[in-house]
Amino acid sequence: MRLTRSFFERDVLQVAPDLMGKKLVRVRNNIIAVYTITEVEAYRGSEDKASHARFGKTYRNSIMFARGGLVYVYLIYGMYWMLNFVTGGENQPQAILVRGLGGIEGPGKLTRTLDIDKSFYGEDLTVSDRIWIENSEDINLSFIQKVRYGIDYAGEPWKSMPWRFILNQRPETF
DNA sequence: AGCAAGATCGGT
DNA sequence: CCGATCTTGCTG
């Protein structure tokens, strides 16, 4: 069953762990593909110096200031699209970067596999017919937290926040 | 208007 | 470790 608005309109540090093991559904050419979410990173507010919101509202990050449940996509290093889910309420810039899906490790690799690009900017996960999140039957999921990747520029304390969430994988689940 | 840097990846 | 590749947002 598809996750609704209320799931995403919570603090990013609540939503991120709840995404562990959830199903990412992608529809293209009438083919439905379902992936297990295995790794995400949380970016929380303008005060988070690792976040794109650290400069306030700009052309690129404006969707982060919208209500939760929308998609934030951007290009990095001129080559890789990054897939994010907006969380929290309006004017509360938060986002969750999807770093890993069952069988696909790496935020740049998964968008290539799922064929996700700029056209998904602002897509609404609660009504879209080509991407959404579903609950999983599995309720016995455990995860660990580590520091976020590639954000040394943020400085302390932000670069040390354990805001990367990784599912404890049980091979038979995938 | 120009430029440095980037929430990455794959090959040496 | 290094290059690819190009948009963004800051600076002047």
Image (cartoon, coloured by chain):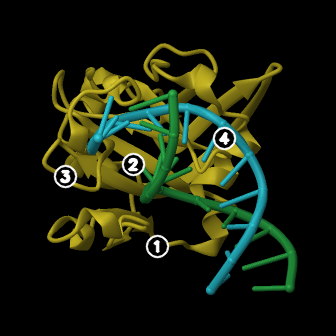
Chain colours: A yellow, B green, C cyan
Q: Mark 4, mark 3: which one is toward the viewer?
A: 3
Q: CA distance from mark 1 to mark 2?
A: 13 Å
- Relative to A143, is A10 on the left or the right? left
Judging by the rendered image, the residue that carries numbered circle 3 is A48
Judging by the rendered image, the residue that carries numbered circle 2 is A19
Density class for disc 1 (Cα within 10 Å; few <14, some 14-19, many ≥20) is some
The foreground one among A136 and A61 is: A61
Residue A88 shows in the view: yes
Which chain's residue wears label 2?
Answer: A
Q: Earlier in the sequence, mark 1 or mark 2?
A: 2
Location of residue C2 in the rendering, given as x and y in whole percent from the top left corner? 68, 77
Give the amino acid at mark 1. Answer: Asn
Give the amino acid at mark 2. Answer: Leu
- The picture quadrant where one finds residue C8 is top left
Residue A137 shows in the view: no
Judging by the rendered image, the residue that carries numbered circle 1 is A168
Q: Secondary structure at mark 1?
A: loop
Q: Earlier in the sequence, mark 2 or mark 4?
A: 2
